[in-house]
Image (cartoon, rainbow, N blue to C red):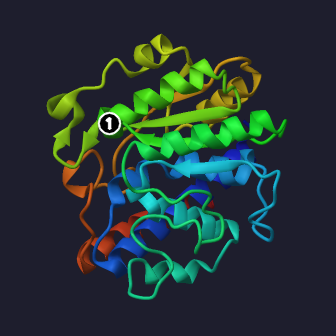
Amino acid sequence: MDAVLKKELEVLATKVRMGVIEATYNAKSGHPGGSLSIADTLTYLYFRRMNVDPKNPKKADRDRLVLSKGHTSPALYSVLANRGYFPVDELKTFRHIDSRLQGHPEMKKIPGVDMTTGSLGQGISAACGMALSGKLSNEAYKVYAILGDGELQEGQVWEAAMFAAHMQLDNLVAVVDNNNLQIDGKITEVCSPYPIDEKFEAFGWHVININAHNFDEIENAFFEAEKVAGKPVAIIQKSIKGKGISFMEDKAAWHGTAPNEEQYNQAMAELQAHLEELDK
């Protein structure tokens, strides 16, 4: 990837992370950890890969994204706001009464949200339906689904995986955010889904393993996914929960804990310092 483009994406991803912190701090609740771990991938998809138009969020030929791990809505809201779907300042209303930015995405209220999600395991099934519809209608759009690694403990995920392979949904790309932590601790200790890549391969998917925080690897993975025919694609991204905030990184406690004022100030200072470093 061109160095200039990479820097632009890193700047945008940092601003997305700032939005995550802003939203959860003002709500005094939410899920910052897993939101921060998918910030780079969502930034790449919305600013580099997906065919979308903030001025026409329901255009028929748009690519679709389903946030199957819907509790990480702060990341989706932040990237949508930074992409121009609604004002960035609206992130401060996250989870407030009468705000459209509630704890889980609502497709009927928020521009840019393609599927209402929240109950883990259901989003990937909805994504399968969207992809099948595109196939039956000979549409060219792609469907992207973001899953958590703890979410793989839901049986419905594997029903969807079997269905997608059976129907040869090569217009479907599932991204598994493998940060190895869920609300109760390490996924290996709660109910291990490993080996994730071998399981998707066994279900008939084309699998790509990447570093979730390397834009070269992210781009190469999605380019590879474009060339796959006859199979759905699973991108297993090794990520860091709480990525970008020193005291949040790789800490299960930040799965569903909002920063207090002191933590908010430290987090924003770290992100601002990173922006200034990128500007040199």
Residue 278's quadrant in the figure?
Answer: bottom right
Give percent across and percent down for residue 53. Answer: 79, 62
Q: Is residue 13 above or below residue 159?
A: below
Q: Is residue 140 above or below residue 273?
A: above
Give percent across and percent down for residue 168. Answer: 66, 21
Residue 276 is at least partly visible in this image? no
Q: Is residue 233 above or below residue 147?
A: above
Give percent across and percent down for residue 193. Answer: 30, 25
- Residue at 65% x, 43% y: name it: 130
- Residue at 67% x, 45% y: name it: 6
Mark 1 surroundings: few (<14), some (14-19) or many (≥20) residues within 10 A: some
Number of on-image labels: 1
| Direction from residue 11 to residue 236 in the image, left or right | left
Residue 2's quadrant in the figure?
Answer: top right
Q: Which residue, as the protein is rendered here, is positioned at the far bottom?
A: 98
Q: Is residue 61 above or below residue 97?
A: above
Give percent across and percent down for residue 97. Answer: 38, 87
| Quadrant assignment for the N terminus | top right
- Residue at 20% x, 30% y: name it: 191
Q: Nearer the viewer, residue 239 or 86?
A: 86
- Residue at 56% x, 18% y: name it: 205
In the image, what residue type sits under mark 1?
Glu
- Kindly identify which residue carries mark 1: 154
| Quadrant assignment for the C terminus | bottom right
Residue 19 is at least partly visible in this image? yes
Q: Nearer the viewer, residue 153 or 219?
A: 153
